């Protein structure tokens, strides 16, 4: 299934694949996902695949932990020659240092955040988490992009 997903991202492009996934996710989980996708230059297949998988994992965390009604998924071209993908929600938020959320008390750091960090690192990028209990969460991944010819 991973191979099929990679092929889908490569054939359809990152923006189209994200649009379709966000629409299906929103319907399935009753969370409105608002998209804001910059006009993107061609994105190398490996970068597109990893960014798509980060978006999937971030939205899975929204579904499992945020207890929200809205999520925002954005991709911005960033200088110099990079992309930033962000997923935000209006949910409960948590303390990124301890994993403690507004409603669940002390939590535990999950594999999802580590997997997103590893994907960003593999692309020479970075992961940033902005969250506070009671104030929602924003996960951002910034990666350099070598333009494809």
Image (cartoon, rainbow, N blue to C red):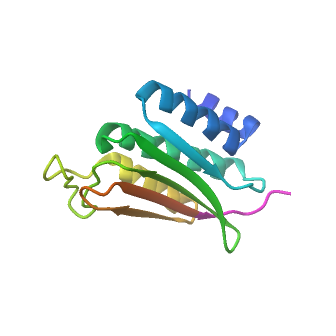
In the drawing, does residue 105 fall left or right of residue 80?
left
> The magenta stretch spans which residues?
143-149
The quarter in which the C terminus is drawn is bottom right
Q: Is residue 130 above or below residue 104?
A: below
Identify the main secondary structure in magenta: loop
User: Is residue 146 highlighted in magenta?
Assistant: yes
Q: Residue at x 37, y 53 (%)?
A: 114
Residue closer to the observer: 22 or 47:
22
Q: Residue at x 69, y 56 (%)?
A: 38
**Displayed quadrant of residue 117:** bottom left
**Displayed quadrant of residue 15:** top right
In the drawing, does residue 76 fall left or right of residue 58?
right
In the drawing, does residue 59 fall left or right of residue 95?
right
Q: Residue 59, how many percent across, how many down?
A: 44, 42
Q: Residue furthest right?
A: 149
Q: Residue furthest left?
A: 105
User: Is residue 64 highlighted in magenta?
Assistant: no
In the drawing, does residue 24 fall left or right of residue 109?
right
Residue closer to the observer: 120 or 79:
79
Q: Residue 1, how many percent across, how many down?
A: 56, 26
């Amino acid at each position: 299934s991973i191979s099929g997903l990679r092929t889908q991202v490569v054939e359809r492009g990152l923006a189209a694949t994200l649009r379709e996934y966000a629409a299906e996710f929103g319907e399935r989980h009753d969370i409105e996902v608002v998209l804001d996708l910059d006009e993107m230059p061609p994105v190398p297949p490996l970068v597109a695949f990893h960014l798509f998988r980060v978006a999937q994992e971030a939205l899975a965390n929204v579904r499992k932990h945020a207890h929200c009604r809205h999520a925002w998924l954005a991709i911005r071209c960033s200088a110099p020659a990079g992309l930033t993908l962000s997923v935000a929600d209006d949910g409960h938020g948590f303390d990124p240092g301890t994993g403690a959320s507004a409603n669940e008390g002390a939590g535990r750091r999950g594999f999802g955040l580590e997997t997103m960090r590893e994907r960003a690192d593999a692309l020479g990028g970075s992961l940033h988490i902005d969250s506070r209990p009671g104030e929602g969460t924003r996960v951002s991944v910034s990666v350099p992009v070598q333009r494809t010819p």
